[in-house]
Image (cartoon, helix red, strand yellow):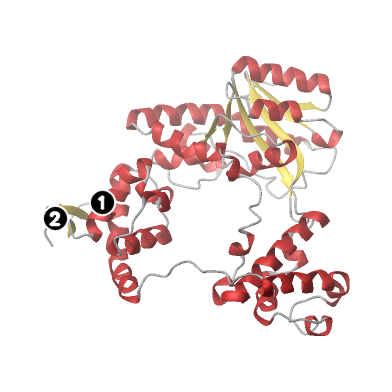
């Protein structure tokens, strides 16, 4: 067997070999997991290789050899087995879609690193180098993982993707425990264990269409029906949704709401072959949208509140960034600018509710949420100072 410090891993192509690998996983109570997949030309990811590390061994599971990976999915869903990943949501999503398994005990080192002072969204190689001091060779990022046989370079690269995960996780956990943030990370990682974290929410696919903000009322209702049709069609054909209809074309269809096949042909970007194939279905979706109730867009705060929130948002952003710098935590994991501005608008409207704002829940509230609310209410001011992070909070005791 191949030790995790060297070698290319053991290629697993039979049920017996898989059972041996999973016996090691169960004995260890933990496994490092990564996948290689192709998705450029399909709706669903095509799984090409699964890498697993356990008990100082690396196993390369080959799903293209007709290997049934359901037993591995059972391990992913087993709360007694910790699953170590790096930016692993897509990997976990593949198993959720194929086998219906829900992860139960995940530790994502990329997420953990953001809480430990290493920055957010770090690539795996860079994180290994920063945490373990080990530079990795990267030469197979854009390889065709579906080709067989795999080359020596491919198998070495694939094995490296799980080889160092246990060591990185161990160092990060020690650092997070020292900082008192391990519970923060565990709270964040519970999002990966929620059923609604995976799959497509068909009721919301239209809200991901670029350019939808220009539509109102029945136009938005038509877009909703068309986006749902596109999603179902892409899934049925196993094609990227943009290969069925691109977003700008979808928006234009919703805006103009053609009612005949000839009118469909006048829509810019709509392939005539797609009209021949699916014109009747598109027209039916458009008609359903016309007859549906108008879509109520998100409530927009009064203009006066928007202006005040916009003016304050720069100060609030500086406040949060200063707190994050002092704590050596990546600002990106605490909040987005949109989340910050939404919270400010609700505070200024006296309508903030923790159910609607991540910044008012859990560790985020302690880290930044309460301070943002205090700033918006005039209970906290900011003062420029000469040393990092160059601004500090001044408690005004509620005085305006």
- Residue 365 drawn at (x, y percent): 33, 45
Q: Position of residue 203 (x, y in %)?
A: 63, 57
Q: Quadrant of the C terminus?
A: bottom left
As drawn, which residue projects farthest toward the top?
A: 27
In the foreground, 147 or 391: 391
| Residue at point 31%, 67% (across, down) | 309
Residue ID for mark 1:
371
Image vertical order of residue 133 relative to residue 78, above or below: below
The quarter of the displayed image where residue 268 is located: bottom right
Q: Quadrant of residue 367?
A: top left
Above or below, 107 relative to 291: above
Quarter occupied by the N terminus: top right
Using the image as rendered, state which of residue 73 and residue 295 is in the foreground: 295
Q: Secondary structure at mark 2?
A: loop
Q: Dot 2 surroundings within 10 Å: few (below 14), some, or many (20 or more)?
A: few
Q: Give SS at disc 1.
A: helix
- Residue 7: tell me if it is visible: no
Tell me what residue is drawn at x 60 percent, y 40 percent: 195
Residue ID at (33%, 32%): 179
- Left or right: 366, with 52 as reference point: left
Q: Which residue is mark 2?
A: 398
Pick whichever, 309 or 314, lies toward us: 309
- Determine crowd level at label 1: few under 14, some 14-19, many 20+ residues with C-alpha closer than 10 A: many
Q: CA distance from mark 2 to mark 1?
A: 12 Å
- Picture coordinates of residue 12 (x, y %)? 79, 26
Instruction: Give the vertical position of 301 relative to 110 (above or below).
Output: below
Q: Image check: 262 left or right of 3?
A: right
Q: Quadrant of residue 149?
A: top right
Q: Which residue appears at 79% of the width and 58% of the height?
A: 239
């Amino acid at each position: 067997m191949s030790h995790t410090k060297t070698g290319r891993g053991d290629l697993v192509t039979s049920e017996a070999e898989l059972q041996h690998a999973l016996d090691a996983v169960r004995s260890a109570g933990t496994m490092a997991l990564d996948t290689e997949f192709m998705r450029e030309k399909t709706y669903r990811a095509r799984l090409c290789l699964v890498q697993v590390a356990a008990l100082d061994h690396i196993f390369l599971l080959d799903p293209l050899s007709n290997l049934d990976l359901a037993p591995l999915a059972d391990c992913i869903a087993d709360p007694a087995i910790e699953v170590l990943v790096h930016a692993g949501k897509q990997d976990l999503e593949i198993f959720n879609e194929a086998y219906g398994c829900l992860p139960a005990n995940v530790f994502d080192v990329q997420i953990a690193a953001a809480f430990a002072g290493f920055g957010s969204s770090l690539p795996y190689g860079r994180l290994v180098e920063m945490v373990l001091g080990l530079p990795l060779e990267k030469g197979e990022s854009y390889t065709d993982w579906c080709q067989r046989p795999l080359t020596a370079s491919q198998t070495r690269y694939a094995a490296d993707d799980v080889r160092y995960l246990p060591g990185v996780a161990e160092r990060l956990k020690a650092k997070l425990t020292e900082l008192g943030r391990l519970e923060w990370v565990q709270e964040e990682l519970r999002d990966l264990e929620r059923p609604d974290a995976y799959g497509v929410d068909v009721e919301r696919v239209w809200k991901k269409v670029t350019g939808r903000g220009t539509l109102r009322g029945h136009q938005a209702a038509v877009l909703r029906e068309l986006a749902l049709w596109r999603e179902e069609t892409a899934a049925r054909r196993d094609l990227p949704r943009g290969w069925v209809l691109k977003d700008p074309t979808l928006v234009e269809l919703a805006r103009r709401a053609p009612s005949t096949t000839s009118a469909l042909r006048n829509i810019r970007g709509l392939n005539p072959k797609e009209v021949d194939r699916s014109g009747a279905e598109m027209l039916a979706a458009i008609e359903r949208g016309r007859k549906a109730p108008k879509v109520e867009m998100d409530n927009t705060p009064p203009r006066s509140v928007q202006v005040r929130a916009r003016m304050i948002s720069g100060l609030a952003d500086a406040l949060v960034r200063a707190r994050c710098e002092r704590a050596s935590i990546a600002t990106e994991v605490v909040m987005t600018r949109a989340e910050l501005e939404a919270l400010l608008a609700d505070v200024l409207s006296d309508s903030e509710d923790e159910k609607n704002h991540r910044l008012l829940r859990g560790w985020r509230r302690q880290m930044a949420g309460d301070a943002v609310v205090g700033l918006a209410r005039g209970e906290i001011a900011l003062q420029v100072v000469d040393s990092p992070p160059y601004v500090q909070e001044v408690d005004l005791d509620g005085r305006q």
